[in-house]
Amino acid sequence: MDLFASSATLTPIPVEDGELAFLPQLALPWPNEEILRRLIDETAWRAETVVVYGKRHLQPRLTAWHGDAGYTYSGLRLEPLPFSPLLQTIRAAVEQATGRRFNSVLLNYYRNERDSMGMHADDEPELGPEPAIASVSFGATRTFILRHKASKRTIKLDLADGSLLLMAGQFQQEWLHGINKLSRPTGPRVNLTFRYIF
Ligand SMILES: O=C(O)CCC(=O)C(=O)O
Ligand SMILES: [Fe+2]
């Protein structure tokens, strides 16, 4: 059986200064809700601290980093966890849909409406000058905010359960992205950003 026989192609979202493409439902061998439950239950989630203006805070979400190899970041050797069979299956589906290769994944767990991610670009040097980053979402729909660095033009994309968003080309150089808190009660969401670390 070809698990990915029904995988549809990504639809480009035309934007200036970068490439975006979207697929509403990635073809996977299990229902989205089962994958969400397994990702929540089987991941070694961490609450990372960040220092903002000299003050330590817990990040407003849980994270986990899995990859094929360690890498050095700001002089620190970061050792990722290995890809589990579940993550390998999701990666294979993402590689099939995008035609790109990925050797690492950052998982973000937004437990409820209070979890968020500040505006940022994934522009670390080890990702290369024009990184392809594939973002897969499970669970509650959250709005992905995109802001062009120079013009400040803002776009909002709803990332629903099972969706795949590919960011590529100059996108990380020219745009910021993030996930806002919400004021209404919201269920859990897990997002996976697949990357290629050189
Ligand atoms: O949760 C999301 O959709 C965004 C995740 C993200 O931007 C990241 O992992 O760098
Ligand atoms: Fe990001």
Image (cartoon, rainbow, N blue to C red):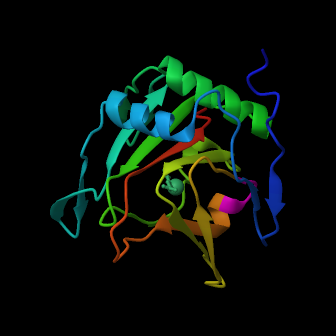
| Residue 53 quadrant | bottom left
Q: Quadrant of the N terminus?
A: top right
**Residue 41: horizontal and vertical position, in percent?**
33, 32
**Residue 125: horizontal and vertical position, in percent?**
56, 46
User: Which residue, as the protein is rendered here, is positioned at the far top?
Assistant: 1
Q: Quadrant of the C terminus?
A: top right
Question: In percent of the image, x 79 and y 36: which residue is there?
Answer: 7
Span of residues in magenta: 167-171
Viewer-nearest residue: 34 or 77: 34
* Residue 143 is covered by the magenta coloring: no
Q: Is residue 186 above or below residue 61?
A: below
| Residue 19 quadrant | bottom right
Q: Is residue 100 above or below residue 68?
A: below
- Let me know if residue 105 appears in the view: yes
How many numbered dots are placed on residues in this image?
0
Question: In percent of the image, x 37 and y 71: which residue is there?
Answer: 181
- Let me know if residue 126 appears in the view: no
Question: In percent of the image, x 64 and y 46: which residue is there?
Answer: 133
Viewer-nearest residue: 80 or 116: 116
Question: In percent of the image, x 48 and y 34: which residue is there?
Answer: 34
Q: Is residue 34 above or below residue 119?
A: above
Instruction: Left or right? Give the position of 112 relative to 73.
Output: left
**Residue 116: horizontal and vertical position, in percent?**
37, 63
**Residue 193: horizontal and vertical position, in percent?**
55, 44
* Residue 169 is covered by the magenta coloring: yes
| Residue 27 quadrant | top right
